[in-house]
Image (cartoon, coloured by chain):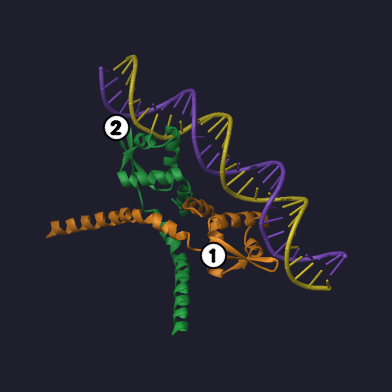
Chain colours: A green, B orange, C yellow, D purple
Amino acid sequence: MTADHVFTALASPARRELLRLLREEGSQPAGRLADRFDMSRPSVSEHLKVLRDAGLVAETRKGRERHYRLEAAPLMEIRDWLTPYERFWRQKLTDLTDLLDDLEDDDA
Amino acid sequence: MTADHVFTALASPARRELLRLLREEGSQPAGRLADRFDMSRPSVSEHLKVLRDAGLVAETRKGRERHYRLEAAPLMEIRDWLTPYERFWRQKLTDLTDLLDDLEDDDA
DNA sequence: TTGTTACGTAGGAAAAAACCTACGTATAGT
DNA sequence: ACTATACGTAGGTTTTTTCCTACGTAACAA
């Protein structure tokens, strides 16, 4: 739910893979997701819990199945967090452009 | 250096705080950064190592000091990683807009 | 109702992360 | 040359994370 939870959730490759599967293949029951991993089903279930706590997935019960769907909204926080850093990598490009311009001026 | 390293580095609040300090206050020697933390200096040094391995900071030796500076470039990978998810939170907004449009049509 | 399927949770082992206090090394100042 | 400062690294402890197997529960199927 907090940005901290989201960063923590994204730190695991398995959890990022879960998000990718839900994004590319749509909502799925927990078991079908678990089949894709070289890992026990309960372990995948725990990863889903971490994602749930971060608000990145939500479940809908359909009979005995639990369908998980992607909830991308919390990722906006990550995006917002990145924003003030954009200036810095852009600056690098600007510096490079300026350098090239200077070289061009020398030629002229 | 890999995206995995970057995600891992960002998972720690202490390391995100280090990045923030470098961003807002500019390059600083390791000791001055460490002073800002309620943590031993060597522990901060280890966090800096994780950031270094992720390519998020770089050091320049100045006498006996080591000045750390922010290297924002690897954050672009995070940004790129987020891109395919944008569609999903935008969809939510679109759904809401459509719903409102429908209500409007009913009125008309 | 009895068995089967789809799950989450408990409890615990193993691995990784986070922290500490020494300690070593290089530079700067006297 | 001697002392102080600014760091990183070693080695070890504690905490957290990650994974497992075993078990409990609810829903469906016969």
- Residue at image location 53% in from the left, 55% down from the top: B54
Q: In this rendering, is residue A65 above or below A93?
A: above
- Residue at image location 43% in from the left, 35% down from the top: A38
Which mark is in front, 1 or 2? 1
Q: Position of residue B106 (x, y in %)?
A: 14, 56
Residue behind mark 2: A63
- Residue furthest left as drawn: B108
Identify which amino acid the numbered label 1 is placed on.
Answer: Leu
Q: Which mark is residue B70?
A: 1
Q: Where, quadrant-wise, is the C terminus of chain A in this rendering?
A: bottom left
Residue A57, image quadrant: top left
Question: Mark 2, residues whose alpha carbon is within 10 Å: few (<14), some, or many (≥20)?
Answer: few
Please indicate whether residue B20 sits to the left or right of residue D29 in the image.
right
Mark 2 secondary-structure assignment: loop
- Residue at image location 45% in from the left, 49% down from the top: A10
Residue B14 seen:
no
Q: Disc 2 is attached to a residue of which chain?
A: A
Please indicate whether residue C19 sits to the left or right of residue A74 in the image.
right
Q: Position of residue B50 (x, y in %)?
A: 57, 54
Q: Is there a contact, CB below 8 Å, between mark 1 and mark 2?
A: no
Q: Give the alpha-carbon distance from disc 1 to disc 2, as whole Å.
A: 51 Å
Name the foreground residue: A21 vs B55. Answer: B55
Q: In this rendering, is residue B77 above or below A70?
A: below
